[in-house]
C-alpha cells in the first residue's frame, strides 16, 4: 500500500491522505465496517481504488458547511420531492468511486427505487444536486476534478463554493462552468425549483 500527497495541500501536517487500495480486497460490507470503526475520519474511494482519508473539518469550515446543508434540508422538507443528505453520507457513483459531498439532494423516487440494504451503506446512486465547500487545505484543482466527476456520473447541478476566493463555480452537464463573484445568493433553479441559497455567511468570518 503506497501513499501520495494531494497537490496543493499543506505539507507541514497532512490534512488529506491518499492510499493505493488497489491490491486490497474488501467487500462493500467490510468497507462500511472499516469506515464505521474510524468514525472520526471521512473517507472517499476513487474509481481506481485510491482511498482518500480526510480529517474532521476545521471548526469554521464545519459551521459554514452546516449553514449550507441546513438551507438545502429546510427547502427539501417543504418541497417534498427529494431528500437532503449531509457530509456524513457516502454514495457509490456509476464509475465505482465512493464520494461524500458536503451537502446533496436526491429525488425521492430515485432513492426509493433502491433496496433497503443498498440504502444502508454507500448507496449506489449519484445525487441530483451536490455542494462542495472548499476548505483552506483543498487545492482548487482537486475540488474542480471532483466536481467534473460528479457531472460525468449524473449530477444535474453542482456548486463549488470557494470562501478563499469568495466565488461559486456552477456546474451543469453540457455547459461551461459559470463563476459567480461573491454572490449574496445563488439560485438552484430550474433543477431545484424554489431553492435559493443565501451565501452571505459564507463570505464573512464565523460570528462576524
Image (cartoon, grey):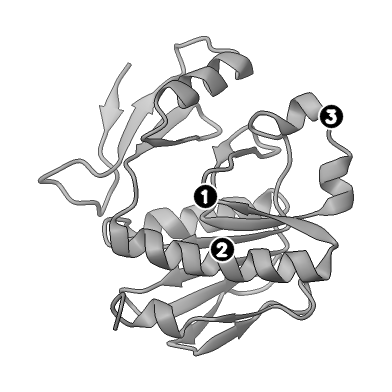
How far is the residue under mark 2 from the one under mark 3?
25 Å
Quadrant assignment, res 178: bottom right
| Residue 119 image offset from top left, x and y in percent | 74, 33
Quarter of the C terminus within the rendering: bottom left
Q: Residue at x 65, y 29 (%)?
A: 121
User: Foreground residue, 199 or 25?
Assistant: 199
Mark 3 is surrounded, within 10 Å at the Cα level, by few (under 14), some (14 to 19) or many (20 or more) other residues, namely few
How far is the residue under mark 1 from the one under mark 2?
8 Å
Question: Is residue 113 positioned above or below 106 on the image?
Answer: above
Mark 1 is surrounded, within 10 Å at the Cα level, by few (under 14), some (14 to 19) or many (20 or more) other residues, namely some
Q: Is residue 157 left or right of residue 207?
A: right
Q: Secondary structure at mark 1?
A: loop
- Whichever of labels 1 and 3 marks the residue nearer the N terminus, that label is 1
What mark, if any, has residue 119 been given in the picture?
none
Residue 55 in view, yes or no: yes
Question: Is residue 45 positioned above or below 184 on the image?
Answer: above
Q: Is residue 20 left or right of residue 177?
A: left
Mark 2 is surrounded, within 10 Å at the Cα level, by few (under 14), some (14 to 19) or many (20 or more) other residues, namely many
Residue 140 in view, yes or no: no
User: Foreground residue, 154 or 202?
Assistant: 202
Residue identifier under label 2: 69
Question: Is residue 164 positioned above or below 81 on the image?
Answer: below
How far is the residue under mark 1 from the one under mark 3?
22 Å
User: Foreground residue, 115 or 25?
Assistant: 115
Residue identifier under label 1: 87
Residue identifier under label 3: 115
| Residue 138 image offset from top left, x and y in percent | 32, 56
Q: Secondary structure at mark 3?
A: loop
Are the residues tagged 1 and 2 within 8 Å (C-beta)? yes
Q: Is residue 154 left or right of residue 63?
A: right
Q: Residue at x 18, y 51 (%)?
A: 10
| Residue 195 image offset from top left, x and y in percent | 70, 78
Amino acid at each position: 500500500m503506497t501513499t501520495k500527497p494531494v497537490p496543493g495541500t499543506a505539507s507541514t501536517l497532512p490534512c488529506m491522505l491518499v492510499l493505493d487500495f488497489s491490491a486490497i480486497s474488501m467487500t462493500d460490507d467490510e468497507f462500511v465496517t472499516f469506515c464505521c470503526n474510524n468514525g472520526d475520519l471521512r473517507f472517499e474511494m476513487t474509481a481506481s481504488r485510491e482511498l482518500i482519508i480526510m480529517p474532521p473539518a476545521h471548526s469554521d469550515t464545519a459551521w459554514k458547511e452546516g449553514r449550507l446543508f441546513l438551507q438545502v434540508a429546510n427547502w427539501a422538507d417543504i418541497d417534498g420531492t427529494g431528500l437532503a443528505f449531509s457530509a456524513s453520507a457516502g454514495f457509490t457513483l456509476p464509475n465505482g468511486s465512493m464520494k461524500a459531498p458536503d451537502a446533496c439532494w436526491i429525488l425521492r423516487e430515485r432513492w426509493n427505487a433502491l433496496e433497503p440494504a443498498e440504502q444502508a451503506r454507500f448507496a449506489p446512486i449519484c445525487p441530483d444536486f451536490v455542494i462542495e465547500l472548499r476548505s483552506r487545505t483543498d487545492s482548487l484543482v482537486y475540488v474542480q476534478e471532483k466536481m467534473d466527476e460528479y457531472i460525468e456520473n449524473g449530477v444535474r447541478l453542482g456548486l463549488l463554493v470557494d470562501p478563499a476566493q469568495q466565488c461559486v463555480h456552477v456546474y451543469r452537464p453540457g455547459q461551461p462552468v459559470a463563476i459567480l463573484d461573491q454572490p449574496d445568493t445563488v439560485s438552484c433553479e430550474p433543477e431545484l425549483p424554489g431553492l435559493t441559497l443565501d451565501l452571505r455567511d459564507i463570505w464573512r468570518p464565523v460570528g462576524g
